[in-house]
Amino acid sequence: MPETIDVRLDFDFQGKQHALRSRIDLEPFLRNGLLADEALPDLYPMLAKDNGIDPYSYEYEVMQMEQPRIVGAEGWLSEFLRDAQLDWQGLLAAYRRRQAVAAIRPIARDRLGIDDLDQHPSLRDALIAAYRLGLESAPG
């Protein structure tokens, strides 16, 4: 299932109302560490592109005077959407945990014969802590 958000931005330009909408896949941003600073990616260029607005136009400048709203989310991201706001800190923490579990799962299966780490929460948490320690102490 895609990890997407639905974004909406309404504004008036030259006497005409615009209701821009975009569906944005956040997985590439998460996977590539582009949300590491716990900030939403810049939605304006994506909204403009998806809705045929030239980023070098006055219309684009007017569009930027309004705040985009997140009106929906799919996948596990939906757990972090409340009142048109995404809980970014919670989302990033959950994403990092998902990455850690994905990394340690094969180790637990191959070395310890454990297929379901959720049945061993203490061991899972210890392996996640070791994984994170390894990431923190890695050079570079």
Image (tube, rainbow, N blue to C red):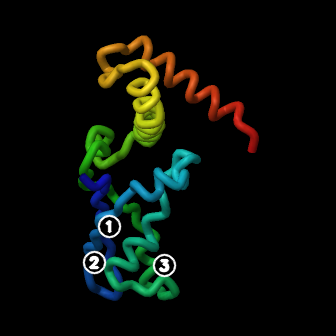
Find out whether the residues at labels 2 and 3 contact each other: C-beta distance under 8 Å. no
Residue at mark 1 to residue at mark 2: CA–CA distance: 8 Å
Q: Which residue is drawn at 34% across and 77% down?
A: 50
Q: Mark 1 points at which residue?
A: 9
Q: Residue 61 carries which label?
A: 3
Residue 36: image location, x then y, percent: 56, 47
Q: Which residue is drawn at 75% across and 44% down?
A: 140
* Mark found first going from the N terminus, 2 or 3: 2
The residue that appears at 48% across and 88% down in the rendered structure is 57
Q: In this view, does 106 lie to the left or right of 139?
A: left
Q: Residues within 10 Å of mark 2 (few under 14, many from 20)?
A: few
At label 3, the amino acid type is Glu
Residue type of the residue flagged with mark 1: Leu
Q: Which of 103 and 1 is in front in this view?
A: 103
Q: Are marks 1 and 2 in contact (CB under 8 Å)?
A: yes
Q: CA separation, marks 2 and 3? A: 13 Å
